[in-house]
Image (spheres, coloured by chain):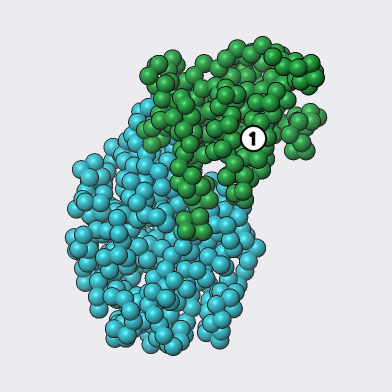
Chain colours: A green, B cyan
């Protein structure tokens, strides 16, 4: 039960069919499960993300700080039609993607945060996010901005996305780009992979989300002598 | 000419540097000086290898800047730019300075900070080494040249994509245990070629070369300290002698070569280095080849005389070129995994060989290695430097 005022503070929401989990065999042979996360898992994710918000490297600080607030907003019912997908390897969190539905026709991509680097984890997760919007939520377009050069390369150039500067993406000032259904299906053979269904045994390995070893993943992101000491 | 020994080495972490090119080069140089424990001896010559600082880092006169930052003035210093072979060219120049008697203690430092710009700009910068009017203006990049070379090589010698992936798997395995390597992830054949998610894991960059057939864009710096062999006993570490150096050039535009699958500059440079050292390929225990693209490791291993032409991939199949094999190639991870800060690479190859010959390579040590060999490949094989190192003096 929630009180009347809280009910007024919560946004209305659209029905969203769940994202069916899939598995991806990474370049190193490990299997990553990509599945929908629930708000019950937000606290675990926040705990994992928090140390990254101080990493002034490859825009991890701004991206992880924004993901932190977006997940918190989702958990506290302050963001409308939000969702989060996670990638886990043996249950260990490898990356997070999130977004929301602007309305039934248009989607908004928020962020892609790869905690495991060098294996195109972010690319697989972003592809899963686009797959969710276009193939499962049946949307016409997804509006996207990049906040890092890596993101710009991965999304704007690799897909490639179309500029849609006349739209003000809600993340702020960066020029908006769009992924249309046509763009998505043209890119799908190159970029959207994965195997379904995921066996119950494999899916079970992704629950509960396990924390990566802090030192290991900070070193991998930071990749400097300072981080190693 | 005097015999020349390497008496000190240093190298930074490879990857994406958070600090300036100059600071990286100072770190490597300082490590080399500390490694040798030079005491109050004065360095009387400095050669700095770099390729792209003018464009990527808006820094020219890098040798003068290094001297100033390290308070080494009035030591003579100059920069050597020879494309991706700048590093070995600088070592060769340092060698000549000591061998000739002009200098007694020479610092050679290589450094490159490529990730100050995005990878498209970095690729653009490297493509400046192609022929301006026959290649560059048509959009030919180094991956494109390597892709065409690989396709011809595959048709001619039966090399397959699996062979290319085997080079990547081997060198990533090697780099996995090198704590200074840029990429420390193992990769598998399933993940690279045969698994269900290959399209995204390992996309084509320049057919037939895929993502994992190409080296990363890296930052890094390395340094070596050279002295006459007769003085080598005065320093802290076991010396390593530069036994042979060879260099050769070739036609710049690849398509104008009589046979684009031949790399005569590699062959001639290697022959000269072996001849000078009085050794043959059979005498080498460990080598660092210039695997900017996986196909190059295979081709260079043949041109250098380690395997007959067209048989390098068969030696790879037999496991002869991995750690524990008959001739370990790039136990550091090579350019493929340790990384390829272009102007620095030739110096870092020498550093890696010195560590091997001193028995200090740790988890990627080749047991009882006495002689090492490196190829530093400039342009697309149109300016190549080969170096033979020998333990002791």
Which picture quadrant has residue B319?
top left
**Which quarter shows the C terminus of chain B?**
bottom left
Q: Is residue B343 above or below residue B234?
A: above
**Residue B323 x/y as whole percent:** 25, 51
Chain under disc 1: A
Give the secondary structure at mark 1: helix
Nearer-the-camera pick, A97 or A191:
A97
Q: Residue at x 53, y 51 (%)?
A: A222
Q: Residue at x 79, y 30 (%)?
A: A168
Nearer-the-camera pick, B58 or A23:
A23
Q: Residue at x 59, y 41 (%)?
A: A50
Nearer-the-camera pick, A73 or B358:
A73
Which picture quadrant has residue A143?
top right
**Residue B156 x/y as whole percent:** 31, 40
What residue does disc 1 label?
A67
Nearer-the-camera pick, B128 or B284:
B284
Observer able to see residue B131 = no
Q: Residue at x 35, y 77 (%)?
A: B7
**Residue A169 x/y as whole percent:** 75, 30
Observer able to see residue B78 = yes
Q: Is residue B345 left or right of residue B263?
A: right
**Residue B370 x/y as whole percent:** 22, 67
**Which quarter shows the N terminus of chain B?**
bottom left
């Amino acid at each position: 039960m929630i009180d009347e005022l809280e009910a007024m503070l919560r946004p209305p929401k659209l029905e969203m069919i769940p994202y069916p989990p899939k598995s991806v065999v990474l370049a190193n042979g490990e299997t990553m499960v990509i599945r929908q996360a629930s708000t019950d898992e937000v606290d675990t994710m926040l705990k994992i993300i928090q140390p990254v918000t101080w990493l002034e490297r490859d825009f991890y600080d701004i991206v992880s700080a924004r993901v932190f607030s977006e997940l918190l907003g989702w958990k506290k019912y302050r963001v409308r039609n939000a969702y989060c997908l996670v990638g886990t390897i043996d249950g260990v969190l490898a990356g997070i993607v999130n977004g929301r539905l602007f309305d039934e026709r248009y989607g908004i991509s928020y962020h892609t945060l790869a905690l495991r680097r060098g294996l195109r984890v972010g690319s697989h997760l972003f592809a899963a996010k686009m797959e969710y919007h276009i193939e499962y939520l049946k949307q016409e377009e997804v509006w996207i901005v990049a906040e890092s050069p890596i993101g710009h390369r991965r999304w704007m150039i690799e897909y490639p996305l179309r500029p849609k500067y006349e739209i003000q993406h809600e993340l702020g000032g960066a020029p908006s780009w769009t992924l249309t259904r046509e763009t998505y299906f043209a890119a799908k053979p190159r970029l959207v992979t994965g195997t379904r269904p995921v066996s119950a045994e494999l899916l079970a390995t992704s629950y509960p989300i396990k924390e990566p070893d802090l030192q290991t993943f900070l070193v991998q992101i930071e990749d400097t002598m300072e981080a190693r000491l | 000419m005097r015999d020349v020994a390497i008496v000190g080495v240093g190298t930074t972490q490879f990857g994406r540097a958070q600090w300036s090119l100059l600071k990286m080069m100072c770190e490597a140089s300082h490590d080399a000086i500390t490694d040798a424990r030079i005491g109050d001896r004065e360095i009387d010559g400095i050669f700095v290898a770099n390729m792209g600082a003018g464009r990527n880092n808006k820094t020219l006169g890098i040798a003068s800047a290094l001297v100033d930052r390290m308070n080494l003035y009035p030591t003579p210093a100059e920069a050597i730019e020879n494309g991706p072979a700048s590093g070995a060219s600088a070592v060769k120049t340092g060698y000549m300075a000591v061998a000739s008697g002009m200098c007694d203690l020479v610092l050679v430092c290589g450094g490159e900070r490529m990730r100050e710009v995005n990878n498209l700009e970095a690729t653009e910068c490297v493509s400046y080494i192609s022929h301006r009017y026959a290649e560059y203006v048509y959009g030919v990049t180094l991956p494109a040249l390597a892709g065409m070379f690989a396709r011809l090589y595959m048709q001619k010698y039966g090399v397959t994509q699996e062979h290319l992936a085997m080079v990547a798997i081997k060198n990533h395995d090697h780099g996995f245990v090198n704590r200074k390597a840029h990429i420390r992830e193992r990769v598998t054949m399933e993940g690279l070629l045969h698994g269900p998610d290959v399209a995204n894991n390992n996309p084509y960059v320049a057919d037939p070369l895929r993502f994992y057939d190409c080296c990363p864009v890296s930052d890094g710096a390395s340094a070596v300290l050279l002295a006459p062999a007769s003085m080598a006993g005065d320093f802290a570490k076991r010396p390593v002698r530069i036994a042979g150096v060879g260099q050769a050039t070739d036609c710049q535009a690849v398509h104008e070569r009589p046979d684009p699958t031949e790399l005569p500059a590699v062959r001639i440079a290697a022959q000269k280095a072996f001849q000078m050292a009085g050794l043959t390929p059979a005498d080498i225990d460990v080598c660092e080849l210039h695997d900017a693209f996986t196909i190059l490791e295979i081709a260079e291993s043949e041109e250098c005389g380690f395997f007959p032409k067209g048989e390098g991939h068969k030696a790879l199949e037999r496991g002869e070129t991995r750690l524990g094999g008959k001739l370990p190639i790039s136990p550091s991870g090579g350019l493929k995994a340790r990384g390829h800060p272009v102007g620095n690479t030739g110096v870092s190859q020498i550093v890696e060989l010195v560590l091997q010959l001193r028995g200090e390579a740790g988890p990627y040590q080749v047991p009882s290695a006495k002689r090492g060999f490196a190829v530093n490949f400039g342009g697309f094989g149109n300016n190549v430097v080969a170096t033979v190192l020998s333990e002791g003096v």
